[in-house]
Structures are given as C-alpha cells and as structure tokens.
Amino acid sequence: MHMLIRRIIGISLVLLATLTLFPIAPVVLLLSFLIARTTRLKSFDRAVLFTYGFLLFEIAGVSRLVWVSIRHHDAAVVQAKSYVVQRWWALGMFHMAARLFNLNFRISGKEAINGPGAIIISRHTNIADNVFPLVFIGQPRNAPVRYILKRELNKIPTLDIGGHRLPNLFIDRSGQQTESELERVRQLVQTCSEADSLLIYPEGTRFSAKKHQAIAERPGMREQTERWPDLLPPRLGGISAILEVNRDKDALFLCHNGFEGSGGISDLLDGSWLNKDIELRFWRIPFDEIGADPQAFIFAQWDRMQSELDDMRSKA
C-alpha cells in the first residue's frame, strides 16, 4: 500500500508540473533566457530546458512501463522489456544533458569493459555520474547493470517502477537497518547471472570538500582522508558484503575527473555544468586477484583511484 501511495503521489506531481509548465513554456523559456544573460545563473535557460525534457522522459518512461505490464504477462519478458525502457530513459537523459550543457567525454581503458559481468566500483561526485555505468558499460555490452541505490530515488516514478521490476536494490542509508540491508545486498549478488554487472559506490554519497572535512574530524578518520584527499573513505559494509559472497566476478573500477563542483541541482543553474571536459578511466581486476580481505583490497584500489585521479588532473 505504501508503494502504491508513493507512486500515485509521484506520478501526480509529474503530471501536475507538466500541465502547469507546458502551457506557459514560451514565457518561461524567454524569462530563463534573459535570466541566464543578466545574472550569475549562466545556465538557467539550459536547466529549464532540461527540466522540460525530464518531465517528457518521465511521462514517456512511465507510459512505456505501464504498457509493458499490460502487453506482457510473463515475468521474465516483463523484466527484459523493462530493462529496455531503463536503458532508453537513462541514455536519453544522458544525451540530452550532454548536448544542453556541452559535455565532452574522453574514455580510456575500454578493454576493461569487455568480458563477463563484473562488480562495478565507481567514484561518485555528481548526480549525473549515476548513469555512467549504464551508458559506458551496460550499453556497449548490451547487458544488465544492477544498481544499489539510495531509497530516496524512489521519489522519481520511472526509477521507482522500473527499478523495482529489475534486480536493483533501494537501500536505507540511515544505519537503522544495517544488517538486514547488507543481507539484501548479498542476495542481490548471489542471484546475478554471468552477464549481469552490479554497481556500488563505496563512498556512499557524492564527494564534496565539506563532506571530506567532516569525515576528517571524526575519531580515527584523519589518516584516511589524508591518504585520499580527493575521495571519501570507502564505507566497508556494502563492498565487504558483496565480496564475501562473490564467487566468480571480476572487479571493474571507474575513476572519472571533470565533474567536481557539480554535485547538486543548484549547479545546473550557475554554469557549473557548462563546457565540461570529463575523462573516464576503467580498469579490471580478475576475480582470482581480489583476495580474501575486502578491506585490504578496496584500500589498495582506492590508492589507485587517487593515483589515477592525480594523473588525469596533471594532464588536463
């Protein structure tokens, strides 16, 4: 019942926003154009266009997911078709943002993407880097990427409906249900097929200098923050649970540079997203080289994550 109410509210809000904003679109777009050129909100007009696009993608995405459930009754078919909708939605949103904000991407380590499904372990700095694994790993391989997402994303109707149809996991980050959440993570890993990849952000939240400093002030954490000045120390619970039950999957790492300082909605407005050159680097660690100590493994790879980041910045 709670899920049904949440979806009714979410879809109603999207419809209300659409019915309100589209009839006055000419006025809104004109005003946003003037604001972008007369204030410090340099990308206000692009953010408004992105909002309109987001509403269209939401309506289309929910409609397609509903049609899938009406048209098909076999659970496996519904899941496969829903994954097609997920990729269409994510790729559409990604390409729309890339064009609107003139984002340029460079990729190295493409060979690491090849091969069977893997445990994808990524740096997290921006609301947009959530789609990087699906766009740059899932799409080229034409294979599913399972997500471990924060529960708050259930507020987006397409993610709510599609995300629960697929083998994704929406977790409570409050810490009140830690063991039960970790058990759900283990179950998600154990049901992965050979082709499936599973994504986790060990930092647990988007990096910012403020968060980094706050962690440094916690007892016993300053050594780690000094060790990784541009990364948040990895939270070991989720990644340890994954590696404990992982039986054959490699670890596929993603480090990216260029999207720092663009972590919130406000950054869509002030030009922080404009004309970004973003570099992504991938590397793969074979399953046999992961070892039995999750902390030692992730700490060593976090050292490499910092090193790769330093190298990208020195060459930018």
Image (cartoon, rainbow, N blue to C red):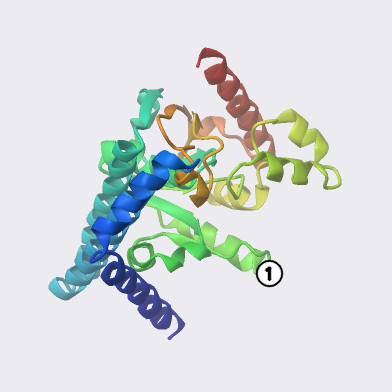
Q: Which of 73 and 85 is in front in this view?
A: 85
In the image, residue 269 above or below residue 1: above
Residue 215: where, in percent of width, then height?
Answer: 76, 45
Residue drawn where x is 65% and y is 52% of the image: 237
Q: Nearer the viewer, residue 311 or 93?
A: 93
Residue 197: where, in percent of width, then height?
Answer: 40, 45
State how many labels appear: 1
In the image, residue 305 above or below residue 272: above
> Which residue lies under the disc numbered 1?
176
Residue 100: where, in percent of width, then height?
Answer: 31, 40
Q: Which of 83 and 277 is in front in this view?
A: 277
Residue drawn where x is 48% and y is 30% of the image: 286
> Hey, what amino acid is under mark 1?
Gln
Is 109 placed left or right of 316 in the picture? left
Is 139 placed left or right of 168 in the picture? left
Q: Residue furthest top?
A: 315
Residue 163 appears in view: yes
Q: Residue furthest bottom?
A: 1
Pointer 1 local density, CA inside 10 Å: few below 14, some 14–19, many at least 20: few
Residue 312: where, in percent of width, then height?
Answer: 52, 19
Residue drawn where x is 30% and y is 65% of the image: 21
Q: Nearer the viewer, residue 105 or 299?
A: 105
Is 301 placed left or right of 157 in the picture? right
Residue 79 appears in view: no
Q: Residue furthest right?
A: 219
In the image, residue 285 above or below residue 183: above
Specify the quadrant that holds the N terminus: bottom left
Please identify the quarter of the rendering in which residue 298 is found: top right
Name the element at disc 1: loop
